[in-house]
Image (tube, rainbow, N blue to C red):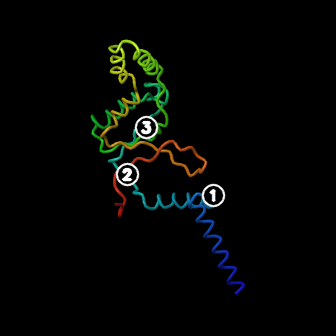
Amino acid sequence: WARRGGRVLATLVIVVLAMLHAAGAWSLLPLAQLDRAIYDARLRWTMPATPDDRVVIVDIDEASLAQFGQWPWSRERLAQLVDELVVRQSVAALGIDAVFAEPERNPGLRALQELAADRQRGDPAVADWLARHQGAVDADDTLAQALRGKPVALGYYLTSDREGRRAGSLPPPLVPAPGAA
């Protein structure tokens, strides 16, 4: 019984550690490395040998940076890229591997917003004009309009760090989970 009990206990310890690791409650470096190695091997075994001609990767390379300026590009430039690919090139779907965690810093927009707030106490026609033209310099709004109703997936940062900052929530799923009401 002692030998058998020792095996059961050892198996139980391994299973509990693996479950804690899988849940993200505890990380075991060798197990994480093994998990990555198995994942890589599975991809090598199951992926087709030739690239799929239907998939095109648009890479922002050194030539693009030389032509359009350093990264990150303005949200207005990204909106132009979305329009080019989705509207003019008719891509079926577009994935943008970038996280837009904060509003774009735009001193011109901030000045207009401050001016509009100040003018609201004065001439309503000036405040109305400022409110109507504020969108012309709001690059976040320009990108949002370019994305609206289009087959575009944006990057989303997920972490298993329990102390991590929560900055929002996941969007609703496009396809409901099986069995979900």
Find the distance from the CA under tag 1 to the CA under tag 2: 29 Å
Q: Quadrant of the N terminus?
A: bottom right
Is 174 displayed left or right of 118 in the figure? left
Residue corresponding to mark 3: 59
Upstream in the sequence, badge 1 or badge 2?
Answer: 1
Disc 3 secondary structure class: loop
Residue corresponding to mark 2: 173
| Identity, as a three-letter code, of the amino acid under mark 3 | Asp
Residue corresponding to mark 1: 27
CB contact under 8 Å: marks 3 and 1: no
* Image depth: mark 3 or mark 2 in front: 2
Disc 1 secondary structure class: loop
Upstream in the sequence, badge 3 or badge 2?
Answer: 3
Q: Quadrant of the C terminus?
A: bottom left
* Image depth: mark 3 or mark 1 in front: 1
Residue 40: % across, % down = 51, 57
Query: Which residue is pictured at 37% across the width and 34% down the height?
Result: 144
Comparing 60 with 106, the one in front is: 106
